[in-house]
Amino acid sequence: MTDLLPSGHPRIDHLEMRGITKRFPGVLASDHVDFDVRTGEVHALLGENGAGKSTLMRILYGLYQPDEGEIRLNGQVVSIQSPADAIRYGIGMIHQHFMLVPTLTVKENVALGLKSSRSFLTDLDKVAARIEQLAKLYSLDVDPDAVVWQLSVGQQQRVEIIKALYRGAALLILDEPTAVLTPQEVDEFFVILEQMKRDGHALIFISHKLHEVIQLCNRVTVLRDGRTIGTTKVEGTTKQQLAEMMVGRPAGLQPTKKPLDAHEVRLSVRNVEALNDRGRPALRGVSFDVRAGEIVGLAGVSGNGQRTLAEVIAGLRPATSGEVSLGGRNVTGLSPRRVMALGLSYIPEERMRDGMIREFTVAENIILREFDQPPYARSGFLNQAAIQRNSRELVNSFNVKTPSLETPAKNLSGGNIQKIILAREISRRPQVIVAAQPTRGLDIGATEYVHARLLEQRDQGTATLLISEDLDEILALADRILVICDGRIMGDVPRAEATAEKLGLLMAGVES
Ligand SMILES: Nc1ncnc2c1ncn2[C@@H]1O[C@H](COP(=O)(O)OP(=O)(O)OP(=O)(O)O)[C@@H](O)[C@H]1O
Ligand SMILES: [Mg+2]
């Protein structure tokens, strides 16, 4: 392995962070944190939303400077002032939001930022050759000449890994890498990580999914409120124990569900056809109903039309034919604003992009959909008291960690930003909820809370379409399960008859 690393990169046998403290205005994000990782190990970093995982890793990658504490590499204290320093020490980081240039090819993206004396073009051939070499070594199947925007999310992630390996990363930080992957992609991804581990890389793995930690990792460190709760071997540790270390109380309970009490059809989709971003047919005659008081799950491997369907229902994408009705009223072709005013709550999959405005405060994001309606607006004036009262209530009940209601949303942790959008959409007393991947990126406590709120809405008579790649989530919540494959509904299975195997076959396009 080491002979493939460009010379001059140090091997990382042992990396230690000792007594790391980091303060932000109003927040102690890291409070004397201790953490270490060794070559040949995958070390999990666990903790609730806002516990300080990303902050600690940004310090290690040189994006933030700690207020106190030290970092030791193979016993020597080092100073990491920037990502360039981190890369020089052999530390790489894969961010949850990829940093690739979509219009460039894979090899151009890998070559970007590399210093070179030769011309860019001759170098590109060299880069392509190295990419193929690395790809073969780690079963990272990517075409160096492919243009990045045409790649799936899983493939883009492989490009990020190749980029880090190319720069000689001996230690790789992975911040929630599986949050954006399908279950199949996760399996492939783990094969790659196992190979890297065998080759002597050190890996730091952040995830909210405890079964992934148990499957992949050697040791785990748990953070809570910026403090280290403990580090332990994963072998012999149960999911339950990890959950308790994280939240400080028993967790991971299955939600209890009342019997189904469904009423009139609230959402009706009839023969809908639509195109995706590349102008190709993504929905091929989709029809189904969702009634008041039921949760209908939409299962499927990502990329089979789920996102297009959600966007058509929300008025964000035109249907080329067919009809969508909400509460008996044809809403096909209406603007998103109109559809939402008619009683649709939409929890988009790309929440960071479609669900909020990063520069706005927490309170402003909470009233984003209804700022021009009572009680927030009366005769053209904003009612600050009502805005404050309602925002505070939602922040408390969803347990959003924020220094204040006036904090810009972009300063919150990833999971806490998500909670704001969920709080806003679930609390609007909608007629219909379309929820896409509603618990992606949420910690165990927040996931339980969202599940409980979706069931509460169902019991109050809301019609819910739950789009999720997480079969456990669908099986826990849905009354009926639709399976989508290649833009067609392959099956409509009552919950009582649904098994993971049966759904899996339908998801693969095998007709029942
Ligand atoms: N740039 C920043 N400015 C101000 N506060 C910040 C900044 N970055 C992080 N914080 C705060 O530090 C705390 C820890 O955030 P961090 O992103 O490290 O959490 P996390 O454990 O990664 O959570 P999640 O699971 O939700 O991603 C949070 O309270 C967050 O609001
Ligand atoms: Mg984070």
Image (tube, rainbow, N blue to C red):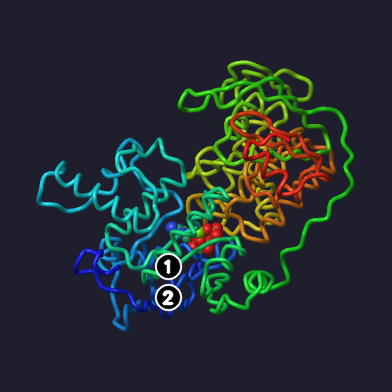
Say left or right for 46 vs 446.
left
Report how far apart the C-alphas of labels 2 and 1 lie in the structure: 8 Å
Q: Residue 93, position in %: x, y?
A: 38, 60
- Check residue 187 in the rendering and tell me which mark sits there, or answer none: none
What amino acid is found at the position of numbered circle 2 in the picture?
Answer: Val
Q: Is the CB of mark 2 within 8 Å of ligand 1?
A: no
Say left or right for 166 vs 485.
left
Q: Is residue 156 above or below residue 49?
A: above
Callout 1: SS: strand
Q: Residue at x 82, y 27 (%)?
A: 265
Callout 2: SS: strand
Q: Name the N-terminal-most of marks 2 and 1.
A: 2
Question: From this viewpoint, is residue 403 visible?
Answer: no
What amino acid is found at the position of numbered circle 1 in the picture?
Answer: Leu
Q: Residues within 10 Å of mark 2 (few under 14, many from 20)?
A: many
Badges 2 and 1: C-beta atoms under 8 Å apart? yes
Q: Is the CB of mark 1 within 8 Å of ligand 2?
A: no
Q: Classify residue 283 by image quadrant.
A: top right
Q: Nearer the viewer, residue 23 or 479?
A: 479
Q: Residue at x 30, y 43 (%)?
A: 144
Say left or right for 160 vs 332.
left
- Residue that numbered label 1 is attached to: 203
Q: Residue 40, position in %: x, y?
A: 41, 73
Q: Residue at x 73, y 51 (%)?
A: 451
Q: Classify residue 424 by image quadrant.
A: top right
Q: Is residue 319 above or below residue 468?
A: above
- Check residue 37 in the rendering and tell me which mark sits there, or answer none: 2
